[in-house]
Image: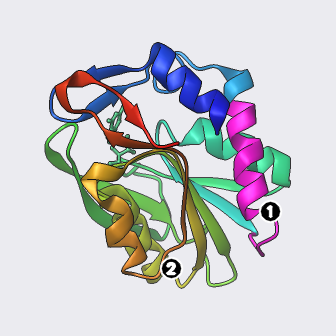
Amino acid sequence: MQLLKKRILQDGRCFEGGILKVDSFINHQMDPGLMKSIAVEFVRKFGASNVNKIMTIEASGIAPAIMTGYLMDLPVVFAKKKSPKTIQNPLSTVVHSFTKDRDYEVVISADFLTPDDNVLFIDDFLAYGNAALGILDLMKQSGAHLVGMGFIIEKEFQNGRKRLEEKGVRVESLAIIEDLSHCRIKIKD
Ligand code: 5GP
């Protein structure tokens, strides 16, 4: 997606340890126009599939997921990173965060993820694939069917795609970062 690649090169910042900071337009301050274009791309990629629900994980997946859900006229559910006391029929799994270097619990209510659901999962980043594999575990527990996973930015060199494709997951990314070494952002054409 040319518009996104251009924006990453213009406003993205690279940090030691393979971290890309895009907090002026995705992760902190957000650009709704760009987010709408991102959602249009996800619809282009997954619109012909039999998706009946969009799923994401809080917090940064919510904006692209809600835009995509709006365009496809589908409900959007997000997995939570803290279990609320009031949650009913919780399903949970543990995910390792490499940006924060810690494990956290991810929870979703089985009321909103059921065997009747054909799910498109959307998130901001695919890095090592830990969050996405956690989502896959929640889907398995719920009996829901995964149609595919869409990421705004994939960091190819951290091999998350390989881990997901090995499990038969369809992976689509709108910008693929080939390399961040020496703090230079190299994006795939
Ligand atoms: P994974 O579980 O695939 O290793 O990492 C995915 C999650 O970690 C994403 O949901 C995202 O929140 C965060 N993340 C991974 N890499 C980056 C990065 O380079 N920049 C930012 N801002 N977040 C990242």
**In the drawing, does residue 99 fall left or right of residue 177?**
left
**In the drawing, does residue 153 fall left or right of residue 18?**
right
- Queried on whether the Cβ of the residue with tag 1 lies below 8 angstroms from ligand 1, the answer reads no
Q: Is residue 153 magenta?
A: no
Q: Residue at x 83, y 47 (%)?
A: 71
**In the drawing, does residue 67 fall left or right of residue 130?**
right
Pick whichever, 57 or 178, lies toward us: 178
Mark 1 lies on a secondary structure that is loop
**Of the two numbered discs 2 and 1 in the rendering, the one whose residue sits closer to the viewer:** 1
Q: Which residue is mark 1?
A: 47
Can residue 113 be seen from the camera position used here? no
Residue 98 drawn above or below residue 8:
below
Q: Which residue is mark 2?
A: 142
Q: How many marks?
A: 2
Q: In the rendered structure, which disc, 2 or 1, sits on the residue that comes first in sequence?
A: 1
The percent coordinates of residue 68 (x first, y second) are 73, 47
Which quarter is ligand 1 in? top left
Mark 2 lies on a secondary structure that is helix
> Range of the magenta residues?
35-51
The percent coordinates of residue 74 (x first, y second) are 79, 57
Give the residue type at disc 2.
Answer: Ser
